[in-house]
Amino acid sequence: MIRVQQEDFDVGAEMARLTAGRTGIGGVACFVGLVRDVAGGDAVAAMTLEHYPGMTEKALARIVAEAEARWPLDGVVVVHRYGRLLPGDRIVLVATASGHREAAFESCAFLMDWLKTKAPFWKREETPAGERWVAARAEDDAAAARWKAGES
Amino acid sequence: MIRVQQEDFDVGAEMARLTAGRTGIGGVACFVGLVRDVAGGDAVAAMTLEHYPGMTEKALARIVAEAEARWPLDGVVVVHRYGRLLPGDRIVLVATASGHREAAFESCAFLMDWLKTKAPFWKREETPAGERWVAARAEDDAAAARWKAGES
Amino acid sequence: MKLLYFAWLKQRIGVAEETVAPPAEVRTVAALVDWLRARGPGYAQAFADLSTIRVAVNQEFARLDAAIGPDDEVALFPPVTGG
Amino acid sequence: MKLLYFAWLKQRIGVAEETVAPPAEVRTVAALVDWLRARGPGYAQAFADLSTIRVAVNQEFARLDAAIGPDDEVALFPPVTGG
């Protein structure tokens, strides 16, 4: 299930929904990304996420399909927020359910890595020096590239 | 925070507690292990977890300390249940908070791998053929061993 | 042709979205960007360094040499930073 | 010396916990296991294959050659399977 929304999400409810009424799932891995109060040494008062409605959902669906092709998954949840968020606010939830924990962990990390480099979101930070757009990180490109070998 | 308990836990509440009032955390990785309804091709009606009170808490504390020594973590939660559980029931929760997602993911996977091989829990399954103790898996030993290089 | 701009590209150009009708010889994203540059200083500044520009054609990532036509939706934006 | 047994070891031996006073020459876990084997068929069966036995002395994992004394808590159990 993929959702792009302004409002916050309930981590426990999302994870419970993934496994509700199902008894063949061995484990659920999950990652929640949060707004940090500091970036590049500067205080961050708020962060605004902009996205490309229409393309965002398609890009996320493609990334999820790729994860499902690579690992035996019993379910995937991706929820990504947009709009203005404050430090400590949740930005994104990725959760993957599988019979085996290795598949759950790996696919969850994969989804985050690809989402960071292949989904059309942009972050703007409010700092004491003014507003600035967050630059793409080379580490994120490298993290996404490590899954490349098996790319379909 | 480490807890060994018979009762269920609330995943959302545990994750929220990890980050409550803190704004420097970039992400939380989490894993929830569940009772599967099948094992080795046999239906599992229930699973009973036995543990070694006293040693369990010490072993988990040591594993958590090792994770904290290896990764820059802002918080760790481990909750492990014991007693009789049914398919779909939660067994274990591991959650790690960090400024960086790589540290959160890796430490969470590490904790699960070490917990499976270094914490004194034993599982007994109820199957149509009777009760049987779960045998240790070679894959779990291998998963735990991959973190060995840097073992302190 | 529908154009969309995001993040700082949108701010420099000053619009989020516009419909344009470039001449027939504009058949690739690169040619479109060249044509846009001549539209004003905001465009010229936004497209000063192509290494910082990413492209989607009809909501799929594409390269600067991707072919485009009058019915396409072309989006121009900096590298993504979500998650 | 306090002994604890877990999982199928406990079931085969028939007790979860007991206090024993082995002779002074029993100074290691291995010697203790040898001494226990002679206590009855349940023990002999439980300790038939030492490769399936794990040990903790005073709630820390230990090896079969670990030294033990009268005041120690010694636990014997199969490989762990939690998580």
Image (tube, coloured by chain):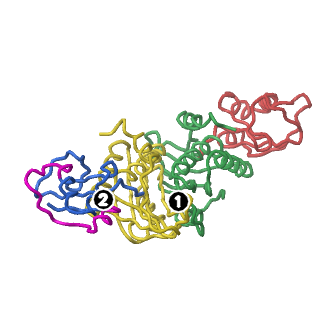
Chain colours: A green, B yellow, C red, D blue
What residue is drawn where x is 76% and y is 44%? C59
Chain letter for mark 1? B
Residue A37 in view, yes or no: no
Q: Residues within 10 Å of mark 2 (few under 14, many from 20)?
A: few
The spot of residue C7 in percent (x, y) is 65, 43
Confirm whether residue B55 shows in the render. yes
Query: Between residues B61 and B91, which one lies in front from this camera angle?
Result: B91
- Inspect the image, locate mark 2, and give the three-letter code of the amino acid beneath it: Gln
Q: Quadrant of residue D19?
A: bottom left
| SS label for mark 1 | strand
> Is C14 left, or right, of A122 in this rendering?
right
Q: Nearer the viewer, mark 2 or mark 1?
A: 2
Give whichever of D13, A101 is nearer the camera.
Answer: D13
The kind of residue on which mark 1 rests is Ala
The image shows residue D67, relative to residue C13, as above or below, that is below
Res. B39 mark: 1
Closest to the observer, A65 or A90? A65
The mark found on residue B108 in the picture is none
Location of residue C15 (image quadrant): top right
Quarter of the image with the C terminus of chain B is top left
Residue D21 is inside the magenta segment: yes
Q: Quadrant of the N terminus of chain B?
A: bottom left
Q: Secondary structure at mark 2?
A: helix
Chain for numbered disc 2 = D
The percent coordinates of residue B23 (x first, y second) are 43, 54
Taking the image as shown, residue B7 lies to the left or right of residue B38, namely: left
- The disc placed on residue D45 is 2
